[in-house]
Image: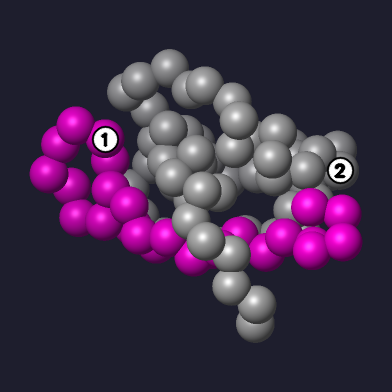
Amino acid sequence: MPAKTGAPGNNDLPGSYRVNVSPETNEIQGATHFGQGVQEIINRIKKAVHNYIPYTHIKNQVFNPPTMAENLTDVFTIEQKSV
């Protein structure tokens, strides 16, 4: 699930997000993030990986703006591609 997105509400350059999801369980297997504010996002992903939380749980959450975590909803709504 790759996505390119920037910080909400400003003109920052877009970052790059890639999240690997198991098609059988919908659990997040790993992630790579590059960009400003990714330390906020990677900790949420780490918590999901270690607690076997499916990506749909994060996709359906509401994140208070303005945070970089808002971008997680966009990352998980992008059409899935098989690698």
Q: Earlier in the sequence, mark 2 or mark 1?
A: 1
Residue 16: image x %, image y %? 39, 62
At horizontal 86% and vertical 43% (from top left) the residue drawn is: 52
Picture layout, residue 80 above or below residue 12: below
Picture layout, residue 64 above or below residue 82: above
Residue 18's disc is none
Of residues 59 and 41, the one nearer the viewer is: 59
Residue 8: which quarter of the image? top left
Residue of label 2: 52
Looking at the rendered structure, the secondary structure element under dot 2 is: loop
User: Could you tell me if residue 39 is visible in this image?
Assistant: no
Q: Quadrant of the C terminus?
A: bottom right
- Assess disc 2: are there few (<14), some (14-19) or many (≥20) residues with their C-alpha within 10 Å of its C-alpha: some
**Apparent side of residue 34 relative to residue 23 in the rendered image (left or right):** left
At horizontal 38% and vertical 28% (from top left) the residue drawn is: 67
**Apparent side of residue 57 relative to residue 27 in the rendered image (left or right):** left
Magenta-span inclusion, residue 47? no
Q: Are marks 2 and 1 in contact (CB under 8 Å)?
A: no
Residue 29: image x %, image y %? 77, 59
Residue found at the far top of this picture: 64
Q: Amino acid at mark 2?
A: Tyr
Magenta-span inclusion, residue 7? yes
At horizontal 72% and vertical 60% (from top left) the residue drawn is: 21
**Apparent side of residue 32 relative to residue 47 in the rendered image (left or right):** left
Start-end of magenta stretch? 1-26
Residue found at the far front of this picture: 79
- The colour scheme used here is one colour
Residue of label 1: 8
Q: Amino acid at mark 1?
A: Pro
At horizontal 59% and vertical 37% (from top left) the residue drawn is: 59
Q: Number of numbered discs present?
A: 2
Question: What is the CA distance from the residue labelled 2 to the residue labelled 1?
Answer: 28 Å
